[in-house]
Amino acid sequence: KCLPCRVVEVSTSKTGKHGHAKCHFVAIDIFTGKKLEDIVPSSHNCDVPHVNRTEYQLIDISEDGFVSLLTDNGNTKDDLKLPTDETLLGQIKDGFAEGKDLVVSVMSAMGEEQINALKD
């Protein structure tokens, strides 16, 4: 399965008797933070995910952990959950409880979306 990742290390091995040089990729999943590795022949291409960041104003947090966000055109976006990152989650919940106007940054790639930052 392809996952959107940030490559943190690439090393190349020499060609064997019969083969191609191989590239060893170490990458971090941009949504889960999990470390992943892959070895690919150096003659092959790699797919690069298209990553978007969009900012939305936070309107509400439901009891089941979903957020209500205001889009640019005035509609609401209600299909995202609060982030799992404890620090970010705390900042969002605390700011919301204090009645601050919060703007969250949502990262999307390959059909997945996640709140990944809080804007001041």
Image (cartoon, rainbow, N blue to C red):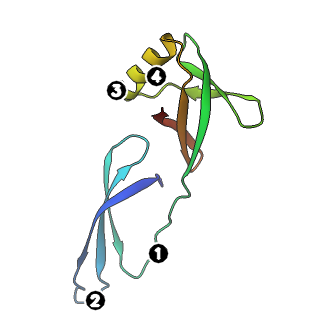
The residue beneath circle 1 is: 45
The residue beneath circle 2 is: 18
Looking at the image, how many numbered discs can be counted on the residues?
A: 4
Q: Earlier in the sequence, mark 4 or mark 2?
A: 2
Instruction: Give amino acid for label 1.
Output: Asn
Q: Earlier in the sequence, mark 2 or mark 3?
A: 2
Instruction: Give amino acid for label 2.
Output: His
Q: Position of residue 72 (x, y in %)?
A: 72, 37
Q: Earlier in the sequence, mark 1 or mark 3?
A: 1
Horizontal side of 10 relative to 79 (left or right) equals left
Observer-side mark, 4 or 1, equals 4
CB contact under 8 Å: marks 4 and 2: no
The residue beneath circle 3 is: 87
Picture residue at 40% right of the left edge, 82% below the top: 43
CB contact under 8 Å: marks 4 and 1: no
Picture residue at 29% right of the left edge, 82% below the top: 21
Q: CA distance from mark 2 to mark 1?
A: 20 Å
Q: Nearer the viewer, residue 44 or 17?
A: 44
Observer-side mark, 1 or 3, equals 3
The residue beneath circle 4 is: 92
